[in-house]
Amino acid sequence: MTNHLSNRINSLPISQTLAMAAKARELKEQGIDIISLSLGEPDFNTPDFIKNAAIQAINENYNSYTPVNGYGELREAICSKFKRDNNISYTPNQIVVSTGAKQSIANVAMVLLNPGDEVILPAPYWVSYSAITILAEAKYIEIPSTIETDFKITPEQLEAAITPKTKMIFFNSPNNPSGTVYTEEEFRALAKVLEKHPNIYILSDEIYEHINYGVPNFSFAAIESMYDRTITVNGVAKAFAMTGWRVGYIGAPEWIAKACTKMQGQITSGTNCIAQRATITALDAPVSKIQYMVDEFKTRRDLILGLLNNIKGIKTNVPQGAFYVFPDISYYFGKTIQGKTINNSSDFSMLLLEKANVATVSGDAFGAPNCVRISYAASQDNLKEAVKRIANVLA
């Protein structure tokens, strides 16, 4: 009966990160000892001060529909956060709270893109960027990068990718899957190119902003010439270990924010009331309250890089943010390991799952077919055991 489904859903790829996570869960249910390094989800508990705010909201009987664009107090808190952390001035009318940053991104794509428009995706990119672009009936154009360039694109590459059909570009720093962080100088150089093309809008996904290890996060909308054309996307999932709470938000030109509110009003309406109240407390708190998680992620990054660098044929860089490493494993292409021929990164990921019982995600899904994504949002013991298994299979 699939021929009765819409072209829209038939053209939509399955999320490879969620597919690998499902496969890992399936094997675990069969009693197989799988170490899952596939999902981008902190393994910490939500901090107690945030949980207590949610409990208080329940006791205060927050249980009614919320405004479509979010509680006024939350939008005020988001404005204060943007000013404090990002040096961007927004008013509450420029803020829209959504059910996760993924919905925020989808809202923006749906209200700005028309069929035939082009969206530039610097690769590697988060898997849902391309899928959301397809849903909006637009076309995505990849700009490739490599581990040798620290997975960054150049102004020259950006200029070459722009056509009369270009409507948007998605930036993501710190980046999923590579952990790459663009510096202020690098973003300003890219902005110089975009200044020549005033009809292109910029979506700046900054969900990992607080998980960085030395290169300060710089927001694209803080560039004066880009402010009126940039939509800043953020949320509380990664930095505050609140993935399941599903709260994301945008800061944008008011006309775009109004359009996103209109779109959301016909899809989900307002975000969960309890999660919103907890998010006010999270954003009002000093960033130092979550530094313990960032410190642990840095320790794990250094640990897994040290272990992977001992395996022949695995090439790494040093990611400056997020909680992923994105090694180039193309050395193994064309080789046969334990009876399995490795033709691409998908074959490599399946080899690790089937033979090492370690779940990763193929770089194909991120527009970087020579790499695999490994999440180090796992215990140090699990990271050590996972890399030991990988090394044994590849030996």
Image: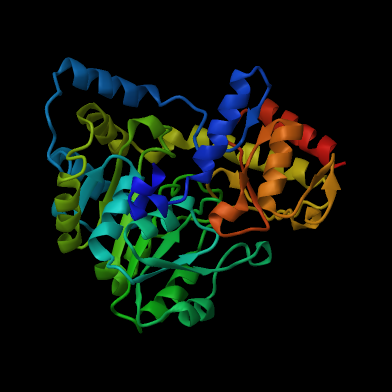
Question: Residue 320's spot in the image, x, y percent?
Answer: 58, 52
Q: Is residue 264 visible?
A: yes
User: Residue at 33% of width from left, 63% of height from top?
Assistant: 137
- Rendered view: 245 above or below 256: above
User: Residue at 20% of width from left, 54% of height from top?
Assistant: 260
Q: Is residue 199 left or right of residue 376?
A: left
Q: Nearer the viewer, residue 139 or 387?
A: 139
Q: Nearer the viewer, residue 54 or 19?
A: 19
Question: Residue 108's spot in the image, x, y percent?
Answer: 28, 57
Total number of numbered labels?
0
The quadrant in which the C terminus is found is top right
User: Residue at 66% of width from left, 61% of height from top?
Assistant: 147
Q: Is residue 252 left or right of residue 16?
A: left
Question: Residue 259's spot in the image, x, y percent?
Answer: 16, 57
Farthest right residue?
A: 395
The quadrant in which the N terminus is found is top left
Q: Is residue 242 visible?
A: no
Q: Quadrant of residue 146?
A: bottom right
